[in-house]
Image (cartoon, rainbow, N blue to C red):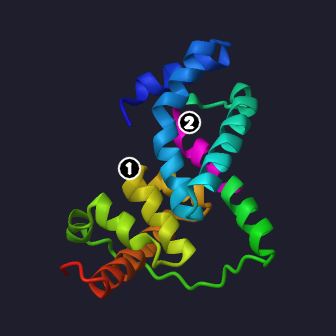
Amino acid sequence: MGDDGHGRLLVVRCQLGEREAFHELVHLWHDPLWRYVKGMVGSPDTADDLAQETWVAVMRGLPRLRQPERFAPWLFTIARRAVTDHLRRTYRTPPTTTEVETETEVDDRDAAVLTALEIQAGLGGLPPLEREVLLLFHLQDLPLAACAEVLGVPPGTVKSRLHRARRMLRDVLVERGYEA
């Protein structure tokens, strides 16, 4: 996402009340944010609304962000809350988190094979947990530790979720006629 020093400086400039800096921050992060939200909710209109909601929350919360270099995980945590609230309002069902995670190594060949386009094509066929971890890790280039922070789970859980998600994604793509 560009170099971290620049991002940190931008956040600090925003905290000092520089309007121009906030526009730059939005310019830098709006696309990845929107892609993540759209990947989670499916509808571009809903994604627009939720991204907007996220930016409003960011504007309010920015002065209190103690570690400017942690902007990315913080941003996606806010976005994730907006998505979760939206899905809860839409479906009115309690979220289930009864999954057993197993420690598995993430195979790097898997990662190389999955292009962003394939991921986009297959995401719709995945359950929310798996879809989300792929969105964060592959489309946003967030490191594992940052993904873990956003998702509120240990890095080992992110690894095993990624492993499972990639396997499921491959199956979905094969089913739809992409080459395995």
The residue labelled by disc 2 is 71
Quadrant in the picture for the N terminus: top left
Q: Position of residue 60 (x, y in %)?
A: 76, 31
User: Looking at the picture, does residue 85 appear above or below residue 92?
Assistant: above
Quadrant hosting residue 65: top right
User: Looking at the picture, does residue 161 appear above or below residue 53?
Assistant: below
Q: Residue furthest front?
A: 45
Quadrant hosting residue 176: bottom left
Check disc 1 and report its element: helix, strand or loop. loop
Relative to 16, 26 lies left or right? left
Task: Name the residue type under label 1.
Answer: Asp
Relative to 21, 107 lies left or right? left
Disc 2 to disc 1, how far (Cα)? Answer: 14 Å
x 18%, y 79%: residue: 179
x 52%, y 38%: residue: 30
x 63%, y 14%: residue: 19
Bounds of the magenta span?
Answer: 69-81
Res. 127 visible in picture: yes
Task: Name the residue type under label 2.
Answer: Phe
The residue labelled by disc 1 is 141
User: Looking at the picture, does residue 44 appear above or below residue 176?
Assistant: above
